[in-house]
Image: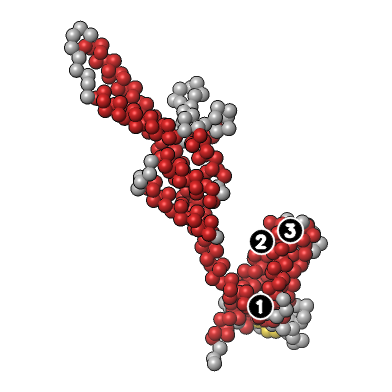
């Protein structure tokens, strides 16, 4: 998290640097290299490597050459391959040369018109070169800026997710700990098994995930012999009716109809997927998301328990 926070800080600084034009293009490249390293952004890293070291002539950088405007205006396939710092130096040198030339141009004699024309041609050539080099610097900065904006928003969203998750994690963990049994140790086992990644571990992890739902149901709404009435509809709430018991608890907690329906659908899908994991191959990425969704939905249900306790008199 510290690394991510540092990446977000650098990204925010970079956006300010670019928007206020505090840094030269070559300085932006160097600072962006730190962001690429912190964020692990391969695409930005590749671009910056070419801009620092120069562009190869083997076709690897073709897409970048076009994106940053380094392609020659002629149809001979040539491009400007020099590192950005050299192009930036050329801009400064050309600008100085133009300033010097603009101070001259007073010719006399029979060759005056020719000399004057050649002088004007030199100025025009230098101006064209300056415009080309300046455009490359500007386009590189523009492309980098777009990528930094994307990284910044990704990091900001990730930090928001982490903040929201952290704000409820202690509460949820405490509620799961109070749910009886060894719920938290189940979570640790799930995490270990999914990190393992082999099919056997994935299946065991999903089975444990299903048992976590069972434990929550046992704690929140213990089995009853008599059916439970939900808005005129009776449902069985025996020991095997895990999802019905959780549905009954959510109803008793006073959740709205739309919220009850959403939680019911989510639990049904998750419980079914966890059960499928015991006899069918499940991709490890899917298993990880199933676990996260299970944790989140149980956390939401636990929050209903906490809210109900807070509203109770005494």
Above or below, comparing residue 10 to residue 302 in the picture = above
Residue 213 in view in this figure? no
Which sits in the foreground, 293 or 16? 16
Q: Residue furthest bottom?
A: 314
Q: Where is residue 140 in the image (x, y as percent from the top left)?
A: 44, 38
> Relative to residue 59, is residue 29 depicted above or below?
below
> Which image quadrant is residue 94 in?
top left
Please give the residue where the numbered disc 1 appears in the rendered image. Answer: 177
Q: In which quarter of the image is the N terminus?
A: bottom right
Looking at the picture, tell me which residue is in the foreground, 206 or 13. Answer: 13
List the residue tagged with mark 2: 289
On the question of residue 38 being in view, the answer is yes
User: Residue under circle 3?
Assistant: 196
Instruction: Classify residue 182 by image quadrant.
Output: bottom right
Q: Residue at x 77, y 86 (%)?
A: 225
Horizontal and vertical percent position of residue 39: 54, 51
How far, Cα to Cα, is label 3 from label 2? Answer: 15 Å
Report x, y in % for residue 95. 31, 30
Secondary structure at badge 3 equals helix
Which numbered tag is attached to residue 141?
A: none
Of circles 3 and 2, which is in front?
3
């Amino acid at each position: 998290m510290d690394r991510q926070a540092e990446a977000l800080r650098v990204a925010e600084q970079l956006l300010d640097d670019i928007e206020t034009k505090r840094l030269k293009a070559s300085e932006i490249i160097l600072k962006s290299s730190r962001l690429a390293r912190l964020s692990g952004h391969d695409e930005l890293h590749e671009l910056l490597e070419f801009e620092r070291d120069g562009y190869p002539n083997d076709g690897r950088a073709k897409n970048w050459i076009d994106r940053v405007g380094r392609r020659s205006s002629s149809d001979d396939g040539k491009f400007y391959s020099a590192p950005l710092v050299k192009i930036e130096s050329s801009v400064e040198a050309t600008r100085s040369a133009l300033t010097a030339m603009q101070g001259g141009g007073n010719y006399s004699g029979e060759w005056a018109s020719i000399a004057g024309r050649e002088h004007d041609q030199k100025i025009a050539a230098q101006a064209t070169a300056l415009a080309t080099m300046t455009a490359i610097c500007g386009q590189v900065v523009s492309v980098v800026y777009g990528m930094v904006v994307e990284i910044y928003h990704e990091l900001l969203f990730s930090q928001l997710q982490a903040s929201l998750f952290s704000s409820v994690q202690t509460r949820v963990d405490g509620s799961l700990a109070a749910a009886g049994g060894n719920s938290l140790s189940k979570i640790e086992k799930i995490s270990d098994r999914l990190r393992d990644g082999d099919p056997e571990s994935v299946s065991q992890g999903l089975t444990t995930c299903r048992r976590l739902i069972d434990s929550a149901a046992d704690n929140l709404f213990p089995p009853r012999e008599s059916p439970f009435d939900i808005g005129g509809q009776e449902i069985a709430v025996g020991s095997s009716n895990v999802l019905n018991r959780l549905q009954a608890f959510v109803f008793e907690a006073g959740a709205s109809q739309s919220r009850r329906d959403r939680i019911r659908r989510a639990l049904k899908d998750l419980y079914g997927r966890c059960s499928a994991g015991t006899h069918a191959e499940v991709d490890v990425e899917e298993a990880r998301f199933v676990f996260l969704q299970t944790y989140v939905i149980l956390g939401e249900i636990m929050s209903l328990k906490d809210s109900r306790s807070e509203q109770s008199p005494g």
